[in-house]
Image (tube, rainbow, N blue to C red):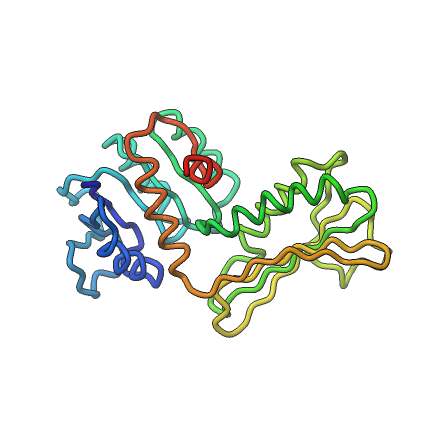
Amino acid sequence: MINILLSGCNGKMGQVISRLAKEKEGLVIAAGFDINTSIQNTYPVYSDLKKCDKKIDVIIDFSHPSVLDGLLEFAVSKKIPAVIATTGLGNSQVKKLNDVSKIIPIFFSANMSLGVNLLMDLVKKAAKVLEKDFDVEIVEKHHNQKIDAPSGTALVIADAINSVSTNKKEYIYDRHSRRKKRGKNEIGIHAVRGGTIIGDHSVIFAGNDEIIEINHIAMSKEIFAVGSLNAAMFVYGKKPGMYNMDHLIQSK
């Protein structure tokens, strides 16, 4: 049995993960970590990781970027693998994840959905074929409570396209102040916030007289919860290193 420490356990995603974990064989949420300890769970919730005395095999983090440093310090001190699913991390934090991955296994993905990660593979294949004659625009839509924009997933999709492009692409986030035509080496990235949209990512390849659009729509938060639990089972027992959804997909 794999014992999970769930960081952000009393947030919306944390509660979804807690519910689905009960139906998942081979793992259990043994403890939670959250500044909000008012919600009653079937496992103990700590606001101070130093007080956690439960045996932990893997950490799942679905919380806030401000928590990352303390969480990694705890993980390194206990030699515990960590699944980092929190979005909005800064460049310095991503660098820290890479540094820590030399000591413990780190599974890091901006999006835990299997479908989104398959979309990235399709987008890279399309970008290779269409690069010379098609412009690329990315539109992401999320609920009105999401803080970061554009989404981490949109940026990862843009990075995926850039990784296979002959010429490095420039990311353009806002066009209202740009009084000039679109550049050939641009990727436009647009954020929509409204209502209760779980997550919608569209990659538009616009050519002469034709448009190709690759789209993924998340219908519920459960797809991200399932992905994080699968990631925890995957990273358990692995050697130190940086792992992502590509590794998980290839293992299936």
Q: Does residue 39 appear to the left or right of 185 in the view shown?
A: left
Q: Does residue 50 appear to the left or right of 124 in the view shown?
A: left
Position of residue 135 measured from the top left corner of the image (x, y, whole percent) = 78, 51
Residue at image point 15% right, 54% down? 44
Residue 214 seen in the figure: yes
Q: Where's the N terminus, which quadrant?
A: top left
Position of residue 174 measured from the top left corner of the image (x, y, whole percent) = 71, 59
Position of residue 33 measured from the top left corner of the image (x, y, whole percent) = 25, 51
Relative depth, front residue between 210 and 192: 210
Relative depth, front residue between 25 and 18: 25
Farthest residue to the left: give it. Answer: 53
Farthest residue to the front: give it. Answer: 252
Residue at image point 85% right, 59% down? 209
Q: Does residue 29 appear to the left or right of 97 in the view shown?
A: left
Position of residue 229 measured from the top left corner of the image (x, y, whole percent) = 32, 48
Residue at image point 54% right, 51% down? 153
Give above or below for 28 relative to 179.
above
